[in-house]
Amino acid sequence: MYNVVTRYIQNQILSLIPSDAEVVHYKIRRNDENLTFEIKPREGKLGDSKLGIGIEVRNNSVIITYLPTGYPGILAGLKVDDKITHINDTDLSTYANLDNLENDCKKYINKNDIGEAHFVLASIYNANNKNKEKEESLIKSIDRGYYLATCSIGNLYLYDDDYLNLEKAEEYLALGSANNAGCAGYRLGFLYKYGE
């Protein structure tokens, strides 16, 4: 499933860093220790490439998952699996709270019942390991014409032992392929060739 939730949270976090910042202050939780880092962004780079810090949300925490060699994040001493608690004194707990994000998304859907919004909600459910709700949201997304969701529901029916259903996978992947969702066509061809 596309990591819509992490990208959304990354964009929110990046908005905390002024484009002309000379130094960005990170507070990190590593093992049972609180650490502070001052990171000088790379000049001439945009967005997250200024710092070279890849993140994801796990258990309502922002966790570092990727630190490319030679970028400011790793050079400052950050490590993969560090928990980012603050950036420039802004507490990230509200940004990483998937329950709040889920509620906000549901409010949005009440006003704008569109396929993309249901897909985002499915991504939030995926991050929270709520597979039944994820399945329902993916189906709503597809029913509202967002056919990229056929790839995600196809993967759910192909690879999740609790939802394994080759007929449903084929049905949704064929629908996505017929509506120009390239990932669905690829997955459907794989299904036809290998039966999985």
Image (cartoon, helix red, strand yellow):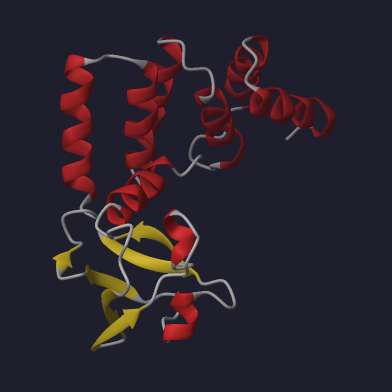
Residue 16 in picture, x, y percent from top left: 24, 57
Name the residue rendered at 33%, 24% in the picture.
117
Q: Is residue 195 above or below residue 52?
A: above
Name the residue rendered at 32%, 50% in the picture.
9
Total label count? 0
The answer to whether residue 136 shows anywhere in this view is no
Q: Is residue 122 above or below residue 38?
A: above
- Which residue sits furthest right? 193
User: In the figure, is residue 42 to the left or right of 38?
Assistant: right
Name the residue rendered at 34%, 24% in the picture.
118
State the quadrant of the C terminus. top right
The answer to whether residue 148 shows anywhere in this view is yes
Q: Is residue 78 above or below residue 111?
A: below
Q: Nearer the viewer, residue 161 or 31?
A: 31
- Which residue sits furthest bottom? 33
Q: Nearer the viewer, residue 53 or 101?
A: 53
Tell me which corner region of the image, top left, top right, bottom left or bottom right, holds residue 135.
Answer: top left
Residue 79 in picture, x, y percent from top left: 44, 81
Residue 114 in picture, x, y percent from top left: 33, 15
User: In the figure, is residue 11 to the left or right of 157?
Assistant: left
Q: Is residue 60 above or below residue 186?
A: below
Residue 107 in picture, x, y percent from top left: 15, 26
Name the residue rendered at 26%, 87% in the picture.
35
